[in-house]
């Protein structure tokens, strides 16, 4: 059963400062409504990654949805797959740009057999005899 929002209990549970929350609120609201990077606005507040931003975003979502999160196995949550938890994830993703960098293309296009033949050709006569004796 979902509990209704209780600001005082949630502030104590999340161990966040209401003063910092009020300062971060415009940025959280911006992230909730727009897909922009707002990290430069949050850094002076000491919010530099998802782990430090999550309590503030959970508080924001709880305040907007009028639902109380609970202590899950991995911290404060609204429950896996719930609308509120997806909203928290979405806001955090917008705040910290969850874009995946493209993998670099490999420049190693050489033929392995050709490389081995070339190296074999560079061996001395004694090394070639020893090599052939071992294969």
Image (cartoon, grey):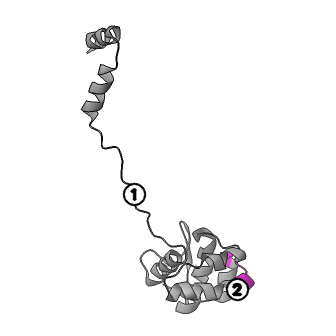
Q: Which residue is drawn at 59% across and 90% down?
A: 63
| Figure check: 129 above or below 5 | above
Task: Label 2, secondary structure: give it.
Answer: helix
From the viewer's perspective, tell me whether residue 96 is left or right of residue 122: right
**Residue beneath label 1, please?**
103
Q: Which of 104 and 58 is in front in this view?
A: 104
Question: Which quarter of the figure has residue 26?
Answer: bottom right
Q: At which x and y percent is residue 12? A: 70, 79
Q: Residue at x 48, y 70 (%)?
A: 98
> Of the residues tagged 1 and 2, which is closer to the observer?
1
- As drawn, the label of residue 23 is 2
Q: At which x and y percent is residue 15? A: 70, 75
Q: Residue at x 30, y 14 (%)?
A: 131
| Figure check: 127 above or below 104 | above
The magenta region covers 13-21
Which circle's residue, 1 or 2, is located before the other in the chain? 2
Q: At which x and y percent is residue 65? A: 52, 91
Query: Please, what is the dominant secondary structure of the magenta stretch?
Result: helix
């Amino acid at each position: 059963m979902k509990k209704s929002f209780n600001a005082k209990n949630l502030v104590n549970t999340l161990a966040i400062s209401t003063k910092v929350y009020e300062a971060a609120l415009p940025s959280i609201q911006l992230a909730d409504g727009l897909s922009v990077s707002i990290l430069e606005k949050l850094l002076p507040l000491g919010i530099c990654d998802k782990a430090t931003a999550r309590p503030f975003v959970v508080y924001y979502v709880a305040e907007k949805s009028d639902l109380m999160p609970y202590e899950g196995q991995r911290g404060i949550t609204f429950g896996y797959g719930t609308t509120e938890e997806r909203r928290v994830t979405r806001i955090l993703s917008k705040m910290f740009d969850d874009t995946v960098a493209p993998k670099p293309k490999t420049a190693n296009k050489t033929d392995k057999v050709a490389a081995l033949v070339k190296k074999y050709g560079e061996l001395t006569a004694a090394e070639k005899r020893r090599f052939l004796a071992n294969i």
